Amino acid sequence: MRFNPEKYRIPDEPMKPFIEPGEIWEYLVNAKPDPVRVKEIIDKSLAKNRLNLEEVATLIAANDPESVQLIKNGARTIKETIYGNRIVLFAPLYIGNHCTNNCSYCGFRTANTSQERMTLSDEEIVLEVEALEDNGQKRLILVYGEHPKYNPEYIAHTVRLVYGVKKGKGEIRRVNINAAPFTIEGFRTIKEAGIGTYQIFQETYHPEAYKWYHLGGKKTDYEWRLTALDRAQEAGQDDVGLGALFGLYDWRFEVMALVRHTNHLEACYNVGPHTISFPRITNASAINVRKQYFVSDSDFSRIIAILRLAVPYTGLILTARESAAVRDEVLEFGVSQIDGGTKLELGSYHEKSKNEQQNLNREQFTINDNRSLNEVIDELINKGNIPSFCTACYRLGRTGEHFMEFSVPGFIKRFCTPNALLTLAEYLQDYAPEHTYKKGWELIHKTLKNELKNQKNLPEIIERLEQIKQGRRDLYF
Ligand code: SAM
Ligand code: SF4
């Protein structure tokens, strides 16, 4: 039978489902990964072009050591030439773990009776944010279970509350959210509160596999979740993040589906995702998941490298679900954002954990990187990466379609690297211990001398760094 994925394809229409497993498998099964073709595909990506499904399937099938190396090198080159050595830092803030769904991989599931249920009060949210600001955080992602309590009005309220907390020189400049899907009206309400990215993971894009894990509640509706980002776009929320929970189904299918989702958003709304996440399942209380689809470390690094090549303009997020060792290793394949100083136990940024160990009964799942924000920053600086708390694009309206427009040659050096340096300088002045302060400023000076030496706005960057030393804050390009 001839290879013909089109015969399965569902046309892209706004707010209509678009995943057809037959189409994705047709590509995967028929992929022919000879080294010449692999090289051609990598070159296409290095020229900053999006890859199509056939090309992504070819990279996935190319599992001989030589091709894997080529793919990883390609991803590394994109990271170095397009993104530079900045890593944007954020922290998650869990607001409440009430949940009416029964997702078998998650500690918040209704069936988990050992989970201690709570929603932070407004006072507790303020204390949590103050503690996060005291650590130097500037960007948060608020996370909620799915429950009538966490309706759009409540979420909008918590977002405004967080923006209002200012302690010392601290403030939160960007609040993203990860929450259940809303109606268009609901998305309008949370957009008005000034959120950055609305993030939602499809968990698994395979409709049958989706049924295995989603055993009760609204989340059983695969299509309502799949079309959530369409409704976000309809509501004007053009800054969206997508993801799949790796370990639920064949990773090759999920990578293809993430790209298919990107194609859908581009086709219907002319804007791709701002970020893609690829969490791997970790332990959780009352978890009930078969291990057959768990992803090994070596496949995990391939996933990141392939996504980097497939969607060169999109930010890739790697979280503290991964150990420090894995994070350090895969960072170079194109990750652009990581969390630092993460605590998942509700209320634990301002309150010491009741257990010295992680408290599975108050958190969604375990994390494997328990380093403080400063330890993460130290490690980034040691490897020559610039920790960044930049929020400039979002605040200057450079989002959605515009974000893509701005992903042009020179943009990173003109805006992103200087903004990374300015926000790092603020951190060093306000929060860093002596040893971090010293090596942080060394990195700033080295970057000015080398990477930015021919930048037209170099004098202005130096002037602003000086102003930060004098006590000015929140300067950006
Ligand atoms: N309740 C909302 C929802 O389901 O969309 C918010 C999301 S949940 C609090 C954040 C994400 O954590 C989920 O979308 C899922 O991908 C991920 N997650 C759940 N259980 C996990 C586990 N055991 N290990 C790693 N990630 C997990
Ligand atoms: Fe609830 Fe989300 Fe956990 Fe599912 S993944 S049980 S919806 S918090």
Image (cartoon, rainbow, N blue to C red):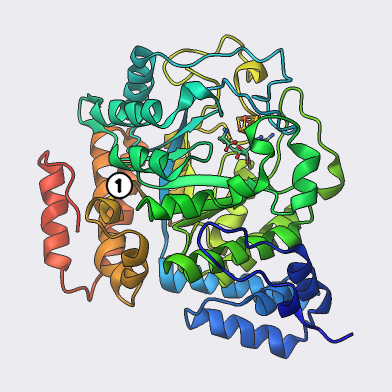
- Residue corresponding to mark 1: 424
Does mark 1 have its CB less than 8 Å from ligand 1? Answer: no
Residue 225 is left or right of residue 191, and the answer is: right
> Residue 290 in the image: x percent, y percent?
85, 39
Residue 35 is left or right of residue 291, and the answer is: left
Residue 255, by quadrant, is bottom right
Residue visible at 30% across and 61% down in the picture: 416
> Residue 67 in the image: x percent, y percent?
73, 77
Is residue 359 visible to the viewer in this orientation of the structure?
yes
User: From this viewpoint, which residue is outermost toward the top?
Assistant: 354
Compared to 446, does 153 lie above or below?
above
Badge 1 local density, few (<14 within 10 Å), some, or many (20+)? many
Q: Quadrant of the N terminus?
A: bottom right
Q: Amino acid at mark 1?
A: Leu
Compared to 229, does 132 lie above or below?
above
Where disc 1 sits, the SS reads helix
Is residue 248 visible to the viewer in this orientation of the structure?
no
Q: Quadrant of the C terminus?
A: bottom left
> Residue 48 in the image: x percent, y percent?
47, 79
> Residue 180 in the image: x percent, y percent?
53, 37
